[in-house]
């Protein structure tokens, strides 16, 4: 079993609204489990609910849109996902996901709440899509493996990925951020597992924060994240592009786009994150 | 009292989690109450909850981010907003909003569910923001009043607004869409009420769908909408810009940005909406 599948594995609870799992230390970034993995896990639960509940049977197997709010940092250890199906329509089925972990005194602490919709992304006709950015081939890009050991010790999550940053957008790693608010790179799972529509939601939140390219190297907690999945991805490398135009009041927006190896736009997202300005 | 304030007015229920109001026919677009008004109403309820609940006292009076999912079309008549405060943090207070109306047999039918966060947008320092687009002055733009009467009969909502479209992005009204996926214009409330942070959330969803500029003149229901409010707006005209790059599988993304009369970016949004392709 792939590391990724193992990390997002769920056991059904007493009914289709409850799912149990455990976050692994190996998927941490800073002092929290990577938010993308948390979202992918929540989507697996809602997808399982839609599949398991005989009154809700649909062909809606692909996450299409997800809006997630992060309340507290997810920690390694057991968690519970509660799901609620809000509406099964012709095109989309929509539901809510809540992830809890036990607090210091065993009380449930909410980590993330999200609303999202599933649909079916088989054989889509594309009318318009942004073209993928030009990137040097992966072997001419900077691997996360080349990052300083002190940085990697705090980013075990990056070891799960094969991430290659375009050198022209990785100057921040050498103390020379471009100040354009842009980051681009190639991404795949280290364990060789091919991307699917749920994994794309994680991939949208997998690169280092684009704030790094603006010289802001601190922690940038995701306050809200909305991702749209547009197609089932072809196998192989994903091309990820991050950008940000808006920074103020201690918050910034980060936009992500992902193209698959066939050159199709497969996912896009926007998140609002907190930033700490240097004094 | 302004039309807008009257349309979003709420009466408190038995406790701060329940609010009652009534949608007016005058705010309909097609066969539904305008989604932007529905969102602004939900935000007034959550804002009221945060203000009314003595255990949740914060200075978080401005909506900062909202993600809304539309389940069924809101109709003129009474509605109830249920609110839940999920977390009060230092920077943001986050909660959930649900709008119900009575169905054919009196049963509650969910119209919209949203999660959002309030903060405080007083005296923000802006580090980066996109510049406002160049537009001809309002009196050289096309007023919604000039639209065909048949169109306006189905869009009473537009009569509540003073909307002036840049002629270079309004060719669709004459059967000549630019096919660029762009729409720009000036916007203010017809009743003269000045914008505030809650009204901005409505303004993000107030223009005709950008799909019109791609020659798609049908109904484009909002499936998911996420808006970020970045500043308290200055008084006067708002400058709104819509664009879309992604259209496929019967869905498209629509991005909106709003600048105030001082030239500051005050709000941005992305929505996923349904489109019907011509055969």
Image: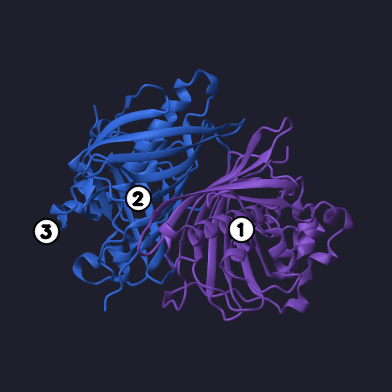
Chain colours: A blue, B purple
Cα separation between marks 1 and 3: 46 Å
The chain holding disc 1 is B
Give the residue furthest to the front. B14
| A34 to A216, vertically: above or below | above
- Name the quarter where the N terminus of chain A is drawn: top left
Place of residue A61 in the rendered image (x, y in percent of width and height, measured from the top left): 47, 29
Q: Are marks 2 and 3 in contact (CB under 8 Å)?
A: no
The chain holding disc 2 is A
Place of residue B54 in the rendered image (x, y in percent of width and height, measured from the top left): 44, 60
Cα separation between marks 2 and 3: 22 Å
Place of residue B270 in the rendered image (x, y in percent of width and height, measured from the top left): 54, 55
Q: Nearer the N terminus, badge 2 or badge 3? A: 3
Residue B186: image quadrant is bottom right
Residue annotated with mark 1: B40
**Local SS, label 2:** loop
The chain holding disc 3 is A
Residue at position x 75%, y 47% from top? B77
Indicate which disc residue A205 carries. Answer: 2
Place of residue A226 in the rendered image (x, y in percent of width and height, measured from the top left): 46, 50
The local crowd at label 1, few if under 14, some if 14 to 19, many if 20 or more residues have their Cα within 10 Å, is: many
Residue B143: image quadrant is bottom right
Residue at position x 32%, y 70% from top? A214
Res. A237 in view = no
- Name the quarter where the C terminus of chain A is drawn: bottom left
Indicate which disc residue A150 carries. Answer: 3
């Amino acid at each position: 079993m792939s590391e990724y599948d193992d990390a997002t594995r769920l056991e059904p609870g007493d009914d289709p609204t409850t799912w149990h799992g455990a976050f692994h230390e190996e998927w941490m970034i800073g002092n929290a489990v990577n938010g993308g993995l948390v979202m992918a896990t929540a989507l697996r639960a809602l997808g399982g609910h839609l599949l398991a509940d005989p009154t809700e049977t649909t062909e809606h197997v692909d996450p299409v849109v997800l809006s997630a709010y992060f309340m507290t940092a997810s920690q390694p250890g057991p968690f519970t996902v509660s799901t609620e199906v809000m509406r099964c329509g012709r095109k989309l089925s929509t539901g809510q996901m809540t992830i809890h972990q036990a607090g210091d005194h065993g009380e449930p602490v909410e980590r993330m709440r999200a609303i999202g919709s599933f649909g079916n992304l088989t054989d889509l006709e594309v009318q318009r899509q942004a073209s993928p950015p030009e990137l040097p081939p992966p072997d001419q890009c900077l691997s996360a493996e080349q990052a300083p050991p002190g940085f990697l010790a705090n980013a075990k999550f990056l070891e799960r990925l094969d991430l290659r940053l375009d050198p022209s957008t990785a100057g921040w790693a050498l103390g020379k951020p471009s100040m354009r608010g842009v980051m681009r790179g190639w991404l795949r799972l280290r364990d060789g597992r091919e991307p699917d529509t749920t994994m794309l939601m994680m991939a949208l939140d997998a690169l280092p924060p684009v704030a790094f390219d603006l010289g802001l190297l601190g922690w940038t907690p995701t306050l809200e994240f909305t991702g749209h999945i547009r197609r089932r991805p072809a196998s192989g490398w994903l091309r990820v592009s991050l950008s940000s135009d808006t920074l103020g009041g201690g918050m910034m927006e980060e936009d992500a786009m992902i193209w698959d190896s066939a050159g199709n736009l497969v996912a896009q997202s926007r998140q609002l994150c907190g930033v700490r300005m240097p004094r």
